[in-house]
């Protein structure tokens, strides 16, 4: 069984906040009539080009565990709102 990485206080908040901010920064470039395309690197096959913010959000997986938790929380909240 792998050891758990436990963080408390400001260190945990700062890392999770970075993850919370990464997701909207990646999605907002696709919004509106002047929205830009985003290239998504797939683990299999060719990369895909999309202007769909939902597809971009689904593909966000961050290397740092705590930053990834922040990004996943934003996705969860967004899915519950719709």
Image: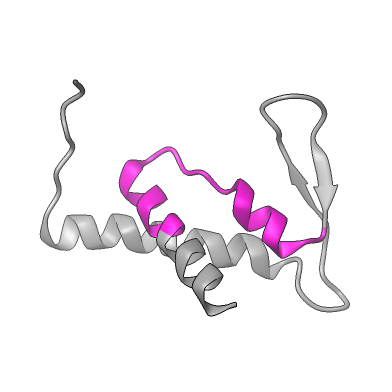
Q: Is residue 69 magenta?
A: yes
Q: Where in the figure is residue 4, as x and y percent of width and height?
A: 17, 34
Question: Coloured how?
Answer: one colour
Q: Residue placed farthest to the top in the image? A: 1
Q: Nearer the viewer, residue 9 or 80?
A: 80
Q: Where in the figure is residue 8, as x and y percent of width and height?
A: 11, 55
Asked where in the image residue 72 lies, by quadrant, the reply is bottom left
Residue at x 41%, y 49% (from the top left corner): 68
Q: Nearer the viewer, residue 21 or 76?
A: 76
Q: Nearer the viewer, residue 14 or 71?
A: 71
Instruction: Give the position of the C terminus as an image quadrant.
Output: bottom right
- The answer to whether residue 66 is left or right of residue 47 is left
Q: How many marks?
A: 0
- The answer to whether residue 63 is left or right of residue 58 is left
Q: Which residues are magenta?
A: 51-72
- The answer to whether residue 76 is left or right of residue 44 is left
Residue at x 82%, y 63% (from the top left corner): 36
Residue at x 70%, y 33% (from the top left corner): 42
Q: Where in the figure is residue 35, as x and y percent of width and height?
A: 82, 70
Q: Residue placed farthest to the right in the image? A: 33
Q: Nearer the viewer, residue 15 or 54?
A: 54
Q: Is residue 12 above or below residue 21?
A: above
Residue at x 71%, y 36% (from the top left corner): 41
């Amino acid at each position: 069984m792998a050891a758990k990485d436990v963080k408390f206080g400001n260190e945990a908040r700062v890392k999770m906040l970075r993850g919370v901010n990464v997701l909207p920064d990646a999605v907002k470039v696709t919004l509106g009539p002047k929205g830009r395309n985003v290239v998504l690197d797939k683990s299999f096959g060719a990369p895909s080009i999309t202007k769909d913010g939902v597809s971009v959000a689904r593909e966000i997986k961050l290397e740092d565990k705590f930053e990834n938790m922040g990004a996943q929380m934003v996705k969860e909240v967004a899915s519950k709102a719709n």
